[in-house]
Image (cartoon, rainbow, N blue to C red):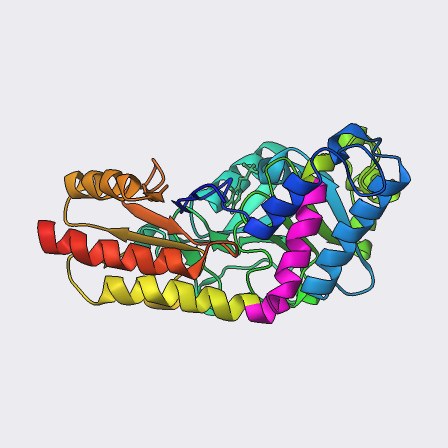
Amino acid sequence: MTERIFNFSAGPAVLPVPVLERAREEMLSLPGVGMSVMEISHRSKPFQAIIDGAEGGLRGLLGIPEGYRVLFLQGGASLQFSMVPMNFLAEGGSADYVITGSWGKKAVKEAKRVGATSVAADMADSGYNRIPAQDELKLDAGAAYVHVTSNETIEGVEWKGEPEVGDVPLVCDASSDICSRPVDVSKYALIYAGAQKNLGPSGVTVVIIREDFLAKGREGLATMLDYRTHAENGSLYNTPNTWGIYILNLVCEWVKEQGGLEGMYQKNVEKAQKIYDAIDATDFYRGHAAPEARSIMNVTFRLPSEELEKKFASEATAAGLDGLKGHRSVGGIRASIYNAFPPAGCDALTQFMKEFERTNG
Ligand SMILES: *Cc1c(COP(=O)(O)O)cnc(C)c1O
């Protein structure tokens, strides 16, 4: 194998090596097909088997109950920021948004362009370093839905469970932690996720939607923006991202081999703990997230100065640890350690952290 570095990128992100190898093997010819997946019709039998496999993979991993549809859309999670309110925020209605970081802020910004919103909580005062407690949520029992972001990729804060929302439909942007841990899908009306963090390459967005919620969608939308179009056509109303769905299918198979979401979760907790332990071992590094809100996918921390942070990121890159620079909006260091990120990379980072402190502390 050619040499691979440790890729801490926040997204598009590291993919499992066995998935990349399989894709390489099948690049010129899918077994029994004689063409690559990128060269065949999305309405062909071989592709139907792939998209069915991808849906079955997600259903199996997440334990998606009967009565939910799984869609493979395009436009990223960012288009979902608009599609959710377009479909479900009716005239005269209002939707609740819980804002735990940068992505939640973007979601509510788009919803406001469509209709009335209410901020159930905004953790700005704490610098988006924690998740609100149940009694901090100002929920409207008549809301069209409640929107949460299960993992704030930029700040590195993650919900450890769902908020209690009564009978109000719960909508979740799970882009950066989908399939990183077991989740009770039945608590949600809609879950969406861009694939490029934990499920595959960019260009595919997974939407898991409860059928009774789907049926409540507004009429008269542009065809492509109406969830029903995609549900009624098995995500094949137009040409989907066939390559992306193919890789997503392989990623699901790989996650299953890791012991499913239970196994994946244990590995993820162990990986994250290594880095959080290294942060907690010294005052040189300061974790951003409050301990109880720490993400197991994106570990964010600061150094004593921005100058040192810059030096840390560039020396890390030179040492084969790439993508550690924090998001441009918040600075600092961010280690994104999604499902496919190897534990050895977390060991390499903690070693690097110790050495960097020794020579710069
Ligand atoms: C990356 C990310 C997005 C944006 O995804 P796109 O596919 O680029 O639109 C939205 N929400 C969260 C939580 C993310 O991590």
Q: Residue sitting at 51 percent across and 39 percent down? A: 12
**Closer to the camera, 172 or 324?**
324
Name the foreground residue: 290 vs 48. 48
- The answer to whether 202 appears left or right of 238 in the picture is left
Q: Does residue 229 lie above or below 251 as drawn?
A: above
Depth check: 43 or 29 in front?
29
Q: In the rendering, at what x and y percent does residue 327 appear?
A: 36, 39
Image location of residue 326, percent across then percent down:
33, 42
Specify the principal SS of the magenta part: helix
Q: Can residue 225 be seen in this view?
A: no
Q: Residue at the front extreme?
A: 1
Q: Does the magenta stretch include residue 257?
A: yes
Q: Where is residue 35 in the image (x, y as percent from the top left)?
A: 79, 32
In the rendered view, would you say 236 is above or below 303?
above
202 with respect to 233 (left or right)? left
* Residue 103 x %, y %: 48, 43
Q: Is residue 242 magenta?
A: no
Q: In this view, does 262 lie above or below 78?
A: below
Q: Which segment is the magenta one?
A: 245-263
Residue drawn at (10%, 51%) of the image: 359
Numbered label tally? 0
Residue 273 seen in render: yes
Quadrant of residue 117 in the image?
A: top right
Residue 267 in the figure: left or right of residue 292 = right
